[in-house]
Amino acid sequence: MCTSARSDVLRRAACALALVLGGCAAGPDFVRPAAPATTQYLPGTPPAETAAGDGARQRFSAETALTAEWWTRFGSAPLDATVAEALAGNRTLASARATLEQSEDALRAGYGLYMPHVGVDLAASRQRASPLRFGQSGPASIFNLFTLSGTVGYVVDLFGGARREVESLRASADVERNTLRAAYLALTANVVETSIARAGYQAEIAATRTSIGAAAERLKLAQTQYQAGTTAYASVMSLKSELANLEATLPPLQLRADQAGHLLAVLVGKVPADWQPPELALSELTLPEELPLSLPSSLVRQRPDILIAEARLHVASAEVGIATANLLPTLTLSGSLGRDAAVWSDLRNSNGRIWSGGADLSVPVFEGGQAWYGRKAAVDAYRAARADYQQVVLTAFEQVADTLRALEHDAELVRDNGEARAAARDALALTDANYRAGIADYLALMTATQAAQGAEVAYLGAIAQRLQDTVALYVALGGGWWNADPAAQAAR
């Protein structure tokens, strides 16, 4: 044996002896990644409050608790009812629950690795035996053989391979548990955001219909003036074109509202033909004023996606331990006890008693590098899982930072669009009065109408966007599942 081969065998033997004497499991003991040292999400001083021109303010505080049922902060009974229906009927959530139960059952099965395996065997056969097989002469004989035996086998977990397998199963269950939390959070967020979007579309539809009604009145007035000879026919045609353009904006809005309703039906587990979402007006939604802002050190222990990445890192760590144990000897203890008889009734006769017992120590010597490189592959997978975890944390911090800035700019957008809407409304009212008095022409009226319509839609869109970005903050912070009532959480 060459020197390097001898030294490799000695290293393995020393490692095995150290593990046996120390009673340790092979591979690294998993340690949760440390929380980031940073204390804030944004550079400089983050905004403590945002305010829009309509008086709606939002304040951020680490002291504000993120409630598990955060959607109730919008103060809408129809919205609460839709979320409750989705939690009860959503198919994706049901699949996540079943997958979690599957992983928990696999973990319970894994605990059997710690237990002896006991079996009972009852066999009956008819045989023809020849003495020549044993170097003896004589005729062959035909006989029956009945055997009743019990066997016990136990794999001694010398190096913790079984413990690491159970640890891997437990971490896999944690993956599915947090996947269920992520599915729960995604479902509630989708229901709330889609409901807000649908309410926004319906508000824009209502505003557009109001503008269409006003444009129809102006067209009627222009037709009267044309018949009286006080205005040109071109004015009538221009106002008719304006009315047609306004009416053309309705179908796309109605389509988006319908699609939002169809999506809500699917989220609650229904086909669109069998379910209609409850009516929800944008003006009925209350903008939450007190918003939570978890510390970064808390965020990494709250967000389901971070917890999923952490659990996967734990699985990869346990897999390294399993691969390490595969490099080391295995010890199996076994025993059997039973009776043989040529006649069924003679199984009670002690003369036919048989037994065996023994131990099997298996030492891997040469496997073509299979176990050795299998462990290296497990280590590589652990390094990849660690990098994935770090990336998920960075992405989570980015999302919180983006949402905080979005809410800050949403308030500015609502304020600016509110001022633009007020100015456009005043300008339209003045231009309409001047047109009716014959002072302004139809071009000025068309310009004022288009500006007022655009400002109204932009303002409603800003209101809906601010509400949706508030939802995004709740989601970015993890959804508050840790503050849920234990009984309600167990039921879910």
Image (tube, grey):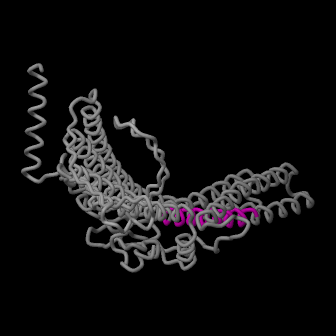
Tell which of 276 and 308 is nearer to you: 308
| Place of residue 222 in the rendered image (x, y in percent of width and height, measured from the top left) | 84, 59
| Place of residue 352 in the rendered image (x, y in percent of width and height, measured from the top left) | 33, 60
Name the residue furthest top. 2
Q: Is residue 477 visible?
A: no
84 is higher (above) or lower (below) than 311: below
Q: Quadrant of the C terminus?
A: bottom left
Residue 371 drawn in magenta:
no
Tell which of 101 and 122 is nearer to you: 122
Tell which of 112 and 420 is nearer to you: 112
Q: Quadrant of residue 176?
A: bottom left
Residue ID at (45%, 41%): 139
Give the extent of the magenta segment.
Answer: 188-212
Q: Quadrant of residue 297?
A: bottom left
| Place of residue 354 in the rendered image (x, y in percent of width and height, measured from the top left) | 30, 57
| Place of residue 144 in the rendered image (x, y in percent of width and height, measured from the top left) | 47, 55
Residue 204 drawn in magenta:
yes
Residue ID at (68%, 67%): 206
Q: Is residue 352 visible?
A: yes
Number of callouts:
0
396 is higher (above) or lower (below) than 90: above
Q: In the rendered view, does 99 fall on the left or right side of 44?
A: right
371 is higher (above) or lower (below) than 325: above
Q: In the rendered view, does 39 fall on the left or right side of 129?
A: left
Q: In the rendered view, does 119 fall on the left or right side of 461?
A: left
Q: Quadrant of the N terminus?
A: top left
Q: In the rendered view, does 253 fall on the left or right side of 346?
A: right
Tell which of 160 and 334 is nearer to you: 334
Name the residue furthest right. 227
Residue ID at (46%, 46%): 141
Main SS, magenta region, reads helix
